[in-house]
Amino acid sequence: MKNTIGNSISVTLFGESHGKAIGAVIDGLAPGIEIDEEFISSQMEKRKGINAISTPRREKDEVKILSGVFENKTTGTPLCLMIENGDTKSKDYSKTRYLARPGHADYTAECKYGGYQDYRGGGHFSGRITAPLVAAGAIAISALRKKGIYIGTHILSCGEIKDRNFENIKEDIELLDSLEMPVLSEEKRNEMLSYIEKIGAEGDSTGGVLSTAVIGMPEGVGEPWFDTVEGMLAHALFSIPAVKGIEFGKGFEITKIPGSKANDPFRMENGKVVTSTNNNGGINGGITNGMPITFNLAVKPTPSIYKSQSTVDMEKKEDAVLEIKGRHDPAIIHRARVVVDSVTALVLCDLLTEKFGTDYLGR
């Protein structure tokens, strides 16, 4: 089972949704990176969601650092993060043990692991496992900010409701950092909250599109062909549960315009090469060009819904009807934004250290 990602800096995930604990091991971090435990806690809070539109499951998500840190600085050895599980209700899943939940990994997990997997709450496939990703990502985000690199993600759309696009990216990222519901327009933020509450009351769920921007990335980072910036980011971002699509820059819309408008003309600005537009999302030939990296992610509706659904009984090999109990989110998109920021930061740290050396983020 492949649970590790990264070349120069790697991250390994462990644990299950209803197990004793979950966590991550980060290897390859430079010595001397400052560890801000208050910032880690603030990032974990963003993942917890909003009471009215999120699961009633309430975990403390206290991050314990078991190794790799001394006197609030990384030592350069493997850094192990652990988060204990507490608010579990495993009996909610025992009655439906062999009923494959539509949209979940129950059937594919049964096919791969032959029944030995921990099925409770989705086990190792659960969105719960994104918690240690956020903890690890907080360390990466802090290190990037020291280098003048900033990441922000907002809900571009939820159902048919659409937020405005990034405008002044630095100011928008600062705004998003203070928002519980990451929507740039206050009016659209309230509309989305109401919509999610409404669809949740109907026993259903919704998805949406997350839009991410990165500023401050130096030019020349990334590799052609197989380790392109797009490829490395997509590889990692598709590991986030519910992500079903990604587009960089103008994405699929770029197919609707001629090359004369799709190309980003180069020009000089204060002695620096910039582009007049950013349709390619800050990347040419798989390598950063110094402009903001931009991409959008499609996030599907939460598959756990309270409506009856057709399924199969995997033990009896017969058709069945599933009626899910337990505690579930009508939308996870607002909670996913910090996961996207975190995964993006980890990938960029990996790419930067490949370019500039393992000590780039530290001393």
Image (cartoon, helix red, strand yellow):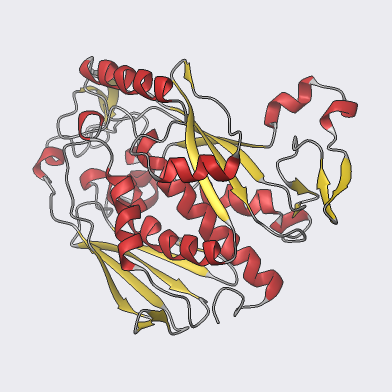
Q: Is residue 206 left or right of residue 323?
A: right
Please state if 176 lies on the left or on the right of 7 as rendered. Answer: left
For image coordinates 64% across by 64% down, the residue present is: 351
Residue 120, percent from left and from top: 20, 46
Which quadrant of the rendered structure holds the N terminus? bottom left
Residue 276 or residue 203, whichever sits in front:
276
Q: Could you tell me which residue is drawn at 13 percent across and 50 percent down?
A: 87
Residue 78 in the image: state x and y as whole percent.
42, 79
Quick check: 211 above or below 288? above
Residue 19 falls in which quadrant of the image?
A: bottom left
- Give the percent coordinates (x, y) of residue 98: 22, 37
Instruction: Classify residue 268 as left or right of residue 48.
Output: right
Establish if 21 lies above or below 232. Answer: below
Residue situated in front as seen by the camera: 22 or 358: 358
Quarter occupied by the C terminus: bottom right
For this orientation, the residue located farthest to the front is 270
**How many marks are shown on the rendered structure?**
0
Which quarter of the figure has residue 353?
bottom right
Res. 207 in view = yes
Name the residue at 41% across, 25% down. 186
Q: Does residue 126 show up?
A: no
Percent across and percent down for residue 342 are 46, 54
Residue occupying image coordinates x 24% and y 47%: 119
55 vs 111, left or right, is left
Depth check, front residue: 46 or 61: 46
Residue 195 vs residue 42, the one in the foreground: 42
345 w.r.t. 102: above or below = below
